[in-house]
Amino acid sequence: MKCVVCKSSDIQMKMVEEEVRSGRDIVLIPIEVLVCQNCGERYYDRKTMRKFEEIKIRLKEHDLEVEEVGKVLRVHAA
Ligand SMILES: [Zn+2]
């Protein structure tokens, strides 16, 4: 497999934190995905996408234990 962005073939499974929006919150999901070691592009397979959808649904139903790790901030119009 080659990276579609930089053509590097150095792509490995890595533990990353993926950001998912849930209402006005942003939730970090630790998940293992394929990452290009050269440019950082992430590749998701169907299983991973399904997992995200499942987590989004469970977040909506407050069926997942989460902890607050920071705040979501916004600047006023620049
Ligand atoms: Zn790349």
Image: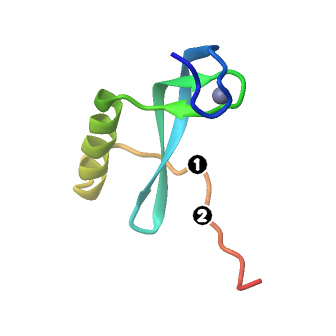
How many C-alpha atoms fall within 10 Å of the one at disc 2: few (<14), some, or many (≥20)? few
Residue at 57% of width from left, 25% of height from top?
A: 35
Residue at 77% of width from left, 83% of height from top?
A: 78
The residue carrying mark 1 is 69
Which element type, helix, strand or loop, lies under badge 2? loop
Q: In which quarter of the image is residue 3?
A: top right
Task: Say left or right for 3 vs 60.
Answer: right
71 is higher (above) or lower (below) than 4? below
Task: Say left or right for 45 vs 5.
Answer: left
The residue carrying mark 2 is 72
Residue 50 x %, y %: 27, 37
How many C-alpha atoms fall within 10 Å of the one at disc 1: few (<14), some, or many (≥20)? few
Task: Say left or right for 6 vs 16.
Answer: right
Q: Where's ligand 1: which quadrant?
A: top right
Q: Which of 8 and 43 is in front in this view?
A: 8
Amino acid bearing label 1? Val
Task: Say left or right for 62 vs 69.
Answer: left
42 is higher (above) or lower (below) than 70? above
70 is higher (above) or lower (below) than 44? below
Which element type, helix, strand or loop, lies under badge 1? loop
66 is higher (above) or lower (below) than 16? below
Residue at 52% of width from left, 51% of height from top?
A: 68
Q: Which of 67 and 46 is in front in this view?
A: 46
Residue 45 x %, y %: 36, 28
Ligand 1 neighbours mark 1 (CB distance < 8 Å): no
Residue at 25% of width from left, 42% of height from top?
A: 54
Amino acid bearing label 2? Val
